[in-house]
Image (cartoon, rainbow, N blue to C red):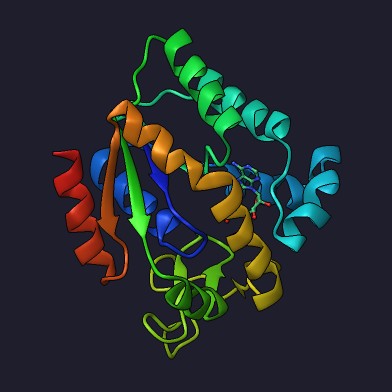
Amino acid sequence: MNIILLGPPGAGKGTQARKLVEERDMVQLSTGDMLRAARTSGTEMGKRVAAVMDRGELVTDEIVIGLIREQLESNGSAGGYIFDGFPRTLAQADALGELLRDMGENLDHVIEMQVDDQALVARITARSTCGSCGEVFNDITKPIPADGKCSKCGGSDFQRRADDNEESLRTRLLAYYKQTSPLIGYYHAKGDLVSVDGLGGMDEVADSIAKALA
Ligand code: AMP
């Protein structure tokens, strides 16, 4: 089964994708994670996209489609793929359709996670991530444990994303509404879209997604 998690920044796509990976043996393909990894390892591409990402704008279709193509060509995917943060434009959606078709694969579901803007700002400005395993914490709903160690891997290096600030978030939201939200109509017309309420707790949202995938 191949699915897309679609939703604004802070909707919980990454958190739910990680849960699906654990529970269903799926492969998470997050273009945001791939781009951050390219920055950390200092590749030419990573250097080129750094400022664009920090401003909260979208990097070019060519770069992200190339990243996804590479992953699809090199990965086995027993339980299928979860596309997390990709596609974000109509051109990316078309390219994904073609890539899957070329592999003899289908897109099975597109899950739109709906969260209102106020909740997104609150979530994102309180968010931090374990630098070792990527577990996501939130100052309000899921604080870093009192012993300062990640509850998943025991790591103690917590990071806040450079683009998790109010100014970048405004740009990211604008990019979402202008460039990505047209995908909701696109996938609705294709009959692939299911919308879930992304406002509840992690397990509640996971249940809604499980129902949508059933
Ligand atoms: P994310 O981790 O999905 O929130 O992505 C972080 C940043 O990476 C975005 O704000 C964009 O600058 C860039 N990015 C990630 N995925 C894409 C994509 N599919 N298309 C264009 N830019 C992307």
Q: Residue at x 58, y 42 (%)?
A: 31
Residue 85 or residue 154, whichever sits in front: 85
Q: Position of residue 124 (x, y in %)?
A: 53, 73
Taking the image as shown, residue 48 lies to the left or right of residue 62, namely: right
Toward which corner of the image does residue 141 lie, by quadrant? Answer: bottom left
Q: Residue at x 49, y 42 (%)?
A: 182
Give the quadrant of the C terminus. Answer: top left
Residue 116 or residue 45, whichever sits in front: 116
Taking the image as shown, residue 78 lies to the left or right of residue 169, namely: left
Q: Is residue 161 visible?
A: no
Q: Position of residue 71 (x, y in %)?
A: 56, 27
Q: Residue at x 52, y 60 (%)?
A: 9
Q: Residue at x 49, y 58 (%)?
A: 8
Toward which corner of the image does residue 151 lie, by quadrant? Answer: bottom left
Which residue is outermost to the bottom? 146
Q: Is residue 131 above or below residue 26?
A: below
State the count of labels: 0
Give the quadrant of the N terminus. Answer: top left
Toward which corner of the image does residue 116 lie, by quadrant? Answer: bottom left
Q: Is residue 157 visible?
A: yes
Q: Position of residue 123 (x, y in %)?
A: 47, 76
Taking the image as shown, residue 101 lies to the left or right of residue 80, namely: right
